[in-house]
Each structure stands twice: as structure tokens, then as C-alpha cells.
Image (tube, rainbow, N blue to C red):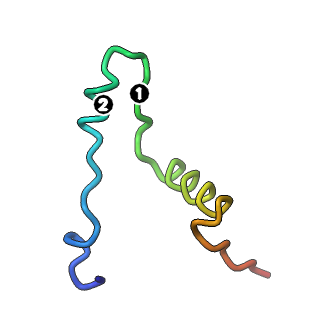
Amino acid sequence: MTGDTDAFYPALDTTQTEEALSGTGIACPPRTGELFDRYVEFSVQENHFPAPPQSG
């Protein structure tokens, strides 16, 4: 799993989604660190990921 991460984790491609949404006024947000954090926070809230350990 960790030896060949390119094979294990496919590249994200939103081309087809963006084409389907073309002209609807809906746009995919840019993939940023902030967006990734938001996805992780949601996944923790929904119990898909464990909560991170508390520091201090």
C-alpha cells in the first residue's frame, strides 16, 4: 500500500463533473488546504475518521 502510492491513490479529476455542471452556475471549489481541512473535519464529525488526539 505505501510502496507505490501513485497506484494506490488515484489522481483526483473533476473534469467530467465540471463539464456536467457547465452552464448551471455551480462550480467546484479549488482544491486547497482549507477545503481538505473542511472535508476532514466533516469526516470526523460523521465518525468516518477518528478524532485527533488532544494536545496539552
Q: Which residue is painted at 56% across and 59% down in the image?
A: 40
Q: Say whether residue 38 is left or right of residue 15.
A: right
Q: Which residue is painted at 39% across and 16% down in the image?
A: 24
**Labels 2 and 1 touching (C-beta < 8 A):** yes
Nearer-the-camera pick, 54 or 8? 8
Dot 2: what SS?
A: helix
Q: Which residue is painted at 64% across and 66% down in the image?
A: 47
Q: Say whether residue 15 is left or right of residue 39.
A: left
Picture disc at residue 18 = 2
Q: Position of residue 2 (x, y in %)?
A: 30, 83
Residue for badge 1 = 27
Q: Say whether residue 22 is left or right of residue 46.
A: left
On screen, residue 12 above or below 4: above
On screen, residue 15 above or below 20: below
Quadrant placement of the N terminus: bottom left
Of the residues shown, which amino acid type is indicated by label 1? Ala
Of the residues shown, which amino acid type is indicated by label 2? Glu
First along the sequence among labels 2 and 1: 2
Dot 1: what SS?
A: loop
Nearer-the-camera pick, 33 or 18? 18
Quadrant placement of the C terminus: bottom right
